Amino acid sequence: MKWNNLNSTLIYPGNVFVVNKPEPAKTEKPNNKADQKVEKPTNNSKDQKVPSTSVYTVKSGDTLSRIAIEHKVTVANLKKWNNLKSDMIYIGQKLTIGDGAKVETPKAETPPKEISYNVDQLIKTAKNQLGVGYVWGGATPNGFDCSGFIYYAYKEAGLNTNRYSSEGYHMRSYYVNTPKVGDLVFFEGTYKSGISHVGIYIGNNEFIHASSDGVVITSLDNAYWKKHFEGFKRFY
C-alpha cells in the first residue's frame, strides 16, 4: 500500500501496482587498480540468481490455464507469484510471470476439506433431469441454463452453495489434471469470450450439462466441445 500510495485495500480491475521495492544498488569506485577485486560466485544458495520475471497483460478471453500453457508455467505458480486467491482475472490486469515453474515439479492441489456432497446423489439427480428444456436463468426441473443446472444438482447432492454464473463457479473451484466423476467441466468462447459454459463430468470422457437443446450427455470428443474445452475443476 505504501509503494502504491493506497489509503485503503480497495482496488479495481485494470489497476497496475508496484509489487516490490528493491534497495538502491551501492556502487563503490575503487581508489586504484590494486583495490579492485573480482568475487567468484559461490555454491551458497543465497548467492544464486533470482529467476527472471516478465509481466503479462490479461486480454479478452484469457484464463489462468491458457496463460500458464502459453508461458510453460503452472497455474499454481501464477497464483503464487501474483498473490491470487482464486482463478478470476480481469482484462488489463498485469500478471508477473517467472521462470521458476519451468523446472519445478508442481505440487498436487487438494481441497481444504473433504467434499461436502454425495457424488452418487449428484449424478443420479443430474441424470434424472435428462430431457428437461433450456430456460435462460432457470434453476429448477421446469427448465435450466448451464449454471442453474450446476446449482440445482449440487444443491440436491448436499453442497451448500449459492447460485452463480459459470464464471462464478469457475472462480470457486480449482484445476485438476485427472478428473473424477462429479468434477466440473468448463468451456470458453461458446457464446461469449472467456468462461461461458459448465457441465458435470460423469466418467467415460462424457459430461452432462444444460445445453441449448436441454439437459443432455455429451462426449468430450465432440468436435465443438473439444474446441472450446477449458479445463476440469473441483469445488473448494
Image: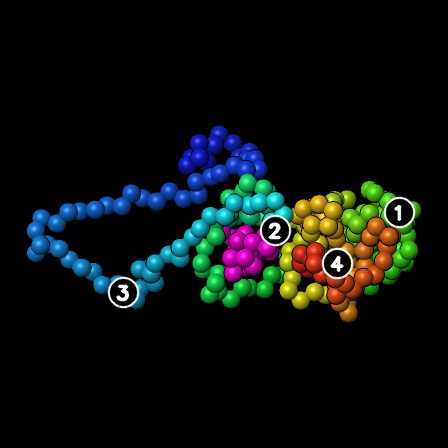
Residue at image point 87% right, 48% down: 134
Q: Which residue is mark 2?
A: 63
Q: Specify the segment rendered in magenta.
A: 63-81
Q: Which residue is mark 4?
A: 224
Q: Is residue 223 left or right of residue 59?
A: right
User: Which circle's residue, 2 or 4, is located before the other in the chain?
Assistant: 2
Residue that extends furthest to the bottom in the rendered view of this protein: 204
Residue that extends furthest to the front in the rendered view of this protein: 223
Q: Is residue 96 magenta?
A: no
User: Which circle's residue, 1 or 4, is located before the other in the chain?
Assistant: 1
How far apart are labels 2 and 3 at the CA level? 40 Å
Three-letter code, disc 1: Gly
Q: Residue 186: give x, y in percent of width and height.
A: 71, 55
Which mark's residue is nearer the viewer, 2 or 4? 4
How far apart are labels 1 and 2 at the CA level? 29 Å
The quadrant of the picture occupied by the C terminus is: bottom right
Q: Is residue 112 left or right of residue 202?
A: left
Q: Which residue is mark 3?
A: 42
Predominant SS of the magenta segment: helix
Which mark's residue is nearer the viewer, 2 or 3? 2
Q: Residue 46: give x, y in percent of width and height.
A: 33, 59
Q: Is residue 10 left or right of residue 156?
A: left
User: Which circle's residue, 4 or 3, is located before the other in the chain?
Assistant: 3
Secondary structure found at label 3: loop
The numbered mark at residue 143 is: 1
